[in-house]
Structure formats: C-alpha cells, structure tokens
Amino acid sequence: MKLDLAPVPRGVDADELLALSDRSGKMLQKIRDSMLQPFPRKQAPIYPSNKVQALCSIDKTKMNYLLKRGELPTGKQEAPGRMRYFTLAETMQWVKKTVDIPERAPGQKGKIITVGNFKGGVTKTTTSMMLAQGLTLRRCRKVLILDLDPQGSTTTFFGINPHAEIDAEQTILPLVDGSVEDLRHAPMKTYWDNLDLIPSSTDLFNAEFMLPAKVHQGDETFQFWKVLRRGLEPLLDEYDYIIIDTAPTLSYLTINALFAGDSIIVPVVPDALSFASMVQFWSLFSDLIGGLQSNKHTEDSKVFDYIDILITRIPKKPTAELVKDWIIKTYRDHVLPVEIPETPLAMNTSAEFSTVYDMPSYDGSTDAYRRIAEPFDRLVDLIDNKTCALWETEKQPSLI
C-alpha cells in the first residue's frame, strides 16, 4: 500500500511573518471592539442598591436611614420606590463610610505584591486583576497594576490593545534602558476608579536584551534584579498596593518582579503537570534568590512578608482533590485557605476581557455568580488583613 504524502511545506519568510502579525493585531482589535460594544472603551460598572448593601454589610433600613441623613451619594432611581443604582465611585464612598477599614498611616509605604508562576494557564492575570479591583472596591485602597507580560493580557483586560495602542515609552522600558530613574511618569488612569495601570506591549521583549547587555558592560556594581524595585519605590507613597502580573517564564523581567515584591502569590492549578511545574518553580526560585544574593556587591538579604499559594481553577474531579492534597501537604501554611473553583462563568468573563467584579448585576444563576465571586472576596479581605497587620507592626517602635 502506497502512502499519500503530504504536500511540501511552502516555507514561511519574513514577509509572511509580518503579514501574520498584522492580521493577528487587526483580529484582536476587532474582537476587543465587538466584546466591548457599544462603547470603544470599557465603562465602570453600575451597582444596584442591594449590591451596595451587601458590600457595606447593611440592610435596606440602614441604607434608607443613611440616605435621609444626606451624607452619602443618593444614586439614581427611575421612580420613587424603584431600585437605586450607584456609580463605582459612589459605591466606594458608601463602603468607606460604613465599613471599618484600617488606614495606612502617614509616611508608611504601600506594598508590592508579585503574582507569579513559570507555568501558563494558572490564572495569574485573572488573579492580579481581581485582586486589584477587589482591593479598591471592598477596601477603598488606591492600587496600581503593572503588566510585565509582553503579551499584554492585563492591559487587554482594561480594554486597551497593547500591540496597537501602547508604545514603548508608556511601559517600563524607559526605566530598563536608563532613560528615566523611576516610574512616576508611567501610571495611566483606567475605567476603574482608584486603579491605575502601567501597561505592556511587545516592546517589553527588548528588556530581555537590554538588561543582560548592561550586565556585560563591565559595571560590577550593577544589580539588574533590583532595577524594577528602585523604579517603583517613589510610587509606594501614593499607592497602597502595586500588583505585578508576570509572564509565565523565568526571564529578566520576571526576576525583577520577584525581587521587587514585598510578597508573592503563586496561583496553581491542581493537576499533576502543574504540580510538577511548581516544584521546578520553587527549585529555580530558591536557587535564584541564593545565587544573586551571594553577589559580593549585595549587602542585604531578601526577606518576603509572605509567599502564598492560591489553588485555582479547581474542577470537580477526584484527581484534582488528590493533587490538592499533595499541594497542602507539601506547602502547608503557605497555602491560602481560599480555593478558586473552575466555573463556566469565570471562563466566559475572561474570554470577554472582564471579571466578576465588572458585572455586579449578573443576570444568570445567583449560585453560579456567588461560587466564583465569594472566594475572590475572601482572597481580597485576607490579603488586605495581612497588609493591615504588617502596617500595624511597622508602626510599633523597635524593642532592639
């Protein structure tokens, strides 16, 4: 029997690659525009009064009492007795007034949280975005999110095409190439109140050449892994949190992100392949920390406030429970007491460049919404409680 041979591949040259790049960029733009219709930009969500009551832990009677006092926004309603609706900014005012939230003391620095894992598909971007939105909404924090992935998924979540609308000067690249000393110029306002963005673009791939080039220029005191931290330091007076979303690779930028973080959150999916990948992550990470800190020009050692593991995208499968048990037994108290389930709603919102926080008036199943929203609410509260405890400790005078 004679086998049918496949046609000879026609080859792919530089022109074809450019054409593919052009078509992919145009397609992403079309997808973004169609997903975000009828507006070309994302709009902040509008919160119904019952959602505001839930965020503030008050009932309808308490809300009516506060409305009559006239100290808080009244929102809008179509007619007397109908549901009131509040803008995101108005909702935040209600939360700040009714929830006892510890404040960062004057002079105290904000915290940098790096979300990282060398494996893709573990919801790093979703976790970063949900954490940033939740901290502004539930805890009235001012947050900056930094997109360090050249693919720009976080930037896309904000309704911005990183490839067509962002140039190198808007990213961290000027810091990397030495054009600027810090990143005070870089944060840009977004559709979400109190949440700013330093975007990404494919230009960030150039950082992987610039940083090692500086290393080889002969300056033995240059510490490439501290470039990002130094650039972010001046922003810690303005922001309560800076959240860094990293690429799923061990790159020069990822190394900078890990060293920049006061703490690290590692999302992991409970499957055998992800578990094996995470074992490699810890091995490389520990070698990296130990190796770079043995540098003769490094006087201080890196100490993280905490390193937490977030088990995410948990399917209803026996094998997932088995791997989850491996993770808990291996990493013990580093595993957060919050589990993010895998749900169709979560996957659909990601496909539409949105999060659950973008849709407070979800029209589908209430149980489906709560199943994904409540774990993220708990994650936000848990992380902010840790930070408040750290801020309180930092206020205490040293006994030494």
Image: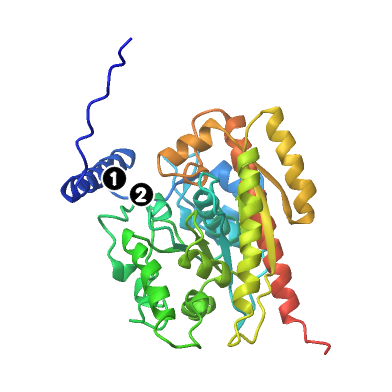
Residue 256, image x, y percentages: 51, 70
Rounded to the nearest angstrom, the CA distance separating label 2 from label 1 is 7 Å
Given the current orientation, which residue lies at the most extreme top position? 1
Q: Are marks 2 and 1 in contact (CB under 8 Å)?
A: yes
Give me the residue at 52% from left, 42% from top.
356
Q: Which residue is mark 2?
A: 42
Q: How many marks?
A: 2
* Residue 140 appears in the figure: no
- Amino acid residing under circle 2: Lys
Q: Quick check: 51 left or right of 309?
A: left
- Amino acid residing under circle 1: Phe
Give me the residue at 80% from left, 47% from top.
329
Give me the residue at 34% from left, 75% from top.
174
Local packing at callout 1 (Cα closer than 10 Å; few below 14, some 14-19, many 20+) is few
Residue 345, image x, y percentages: 52, 33
Given the current orientation, which residue lies at the most extreme front position? 1
Local packing at callout 2 (Cα closer than 10 Å; few below 14, some 14-19, many 20+) is many
Residue 46, image x, y percentages: 45, 46
Give me the residue at 27% from left, 24% from top.
6
Say which mark, if any, is on residue 39.
1
Q: Give the quadrant of residue 295.
A: bottom right
Judged from the image, the secondary structure of the residue bearing numbered disc 2 is loop
Where 370 sits versus 97, above or below?
above
For the C terminus, the quadrant is: bottom right
